[in-house]
Amino acid sequence: MSEQKAENDALIPGDDETEMTWETHSREAIESAAASIEKDEVRGVIYMDDGEDHRFNPKRGEFESWEDVMRALTEIGENEWVAYAPFDGGEPLFSPSVDGYVESAMIDHDVEGFFDSISRPEEGEEIVDAHDLLAYRAGLIVQVDLAEINAELVRYLAEHPAKMYELNPRKFEELVAELFRAKGYDIELGRGTKDGGVDIRAFLRNDVGALLTLIQCKRHLAHNKVNVDVVRGLYGVVNRDDASCGMIVTTSTFTRDARSEQRRLEHRIHLADYTDLTKWLRDYPQPGRTH
């Protein structure tokens, strides 16, 4: 008797008297999942709740195309439909039909538009996928020339400098190398292994000769200041390699002792922190931009 009542209750229309209970639950589940969408423009992905873990907490999924989002929303809607639809002989009386709900959610949250806006370059262009370039949840497929960081990435970081914290350390070194190349230096980038405390060798050439700057890159979080030992260590390498000077470039800043040591070493060691980096990013020459 109770099963018959539950089945009859399921047939009661919703508020608009055209939507059945299973349709309402399906639509609301799709809308709830779509409302959780986060668009990561740097990595070129969408994050969305697409299920629950063993404690019934929302489980976050990562989606690399609008088709993936559509499939996930369809599955969510169909699962809710089957859970609430009346059954006969082990089969739901009404087959899941959630395409309209999914399409509405995709339009409301401009899912296709997002992926179109970060579409990959035309065939033949060299790219690096943001999954290789940036940490999880960092974000946009960024085009990168094989020899240098692309101007598009520099422009993006100039507008969103905090994203530098999410670059992996090797890509941060490549970014710094490109910023110095734009200043007129000839660049030798280290191999990414133990380079004796030097990540970049930057040569500034003129009619008289060349000045060699040894650069050490520290992609640190804001609270993780570079200490005096790093300054002293680079100074030792500058002397060992008979370089003109050394520079430490960091996304954070320096301890008081580190700055005091730099002042003592005067022109042999230079320090560049987050503020300096943001200025370099803004000053980077962009196509079509005049200074």
Image (cartoon, rainbow, N blue to C red):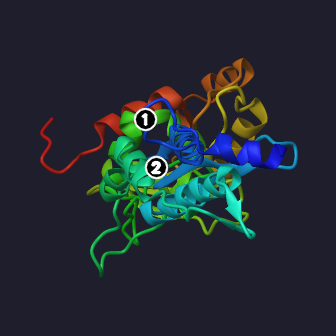
**Residue under the point 17% across and 51% down:** 287
Q: Which mark is residue 42?
A: 2
Amino acid type, mark 2: Val
Binning the other alpha carbons within 10 Å of mark 1 as few (below 14), some (14 to 19) or many (20 upward) gives few
Image position, residue 43 (x, y; %) = 50, 54
> In terms of secondary structure, where does tag 1 sit?
loop
Could you say which is closer to the camera, residue 150 or residue 228?
150
Q: Is residue 54 left or right of residue 146?
A: right
Image position, residue 198 (x, y; %) = 63, 55
In primary-sequence order, the first of circles 2 and 1 is 2
Could you say which is closer to the camera, residue 46 or residue 153?
46
Q: Is residue 241 left or right of residue 70?
A: right
Against 212, residue 90 (above or below) is below
Q: Residue furthest front?
A: 1
Binning the other alpha carbons within 10 Å of mark 2 as few (below 14), some (14 to 19) or many (20 upward) gives many
Q: Is residue 278 left or right of residue 222?
A: left
Amino acid type, mark 1: His
Q: Given this view, does label 2 or label 1 mark the residue nearer the observer?
A: 2
- Image quarter (top left, top right, bottom left or bottom right) of the C terminus: top left
**Residue under the point 63% across and 30% down:** 265
Against 129, residue 140 (above or below) is above
> In terms of secondary structure, where does tag 2 sit?
loop
Residue 212 in view of the camera: no
Residue 69 in view of the camera: yes
Against 264, residue 99 (above or below) is below
Q: Residue furthest bottom?
A: 124
Number of numbered tags placed on the structure image: 2
The answer to the question of whether label 2 and label 1 lie on touching residues, with beta carbons closer than 8 A, is: yes
Residue under label 1: 160
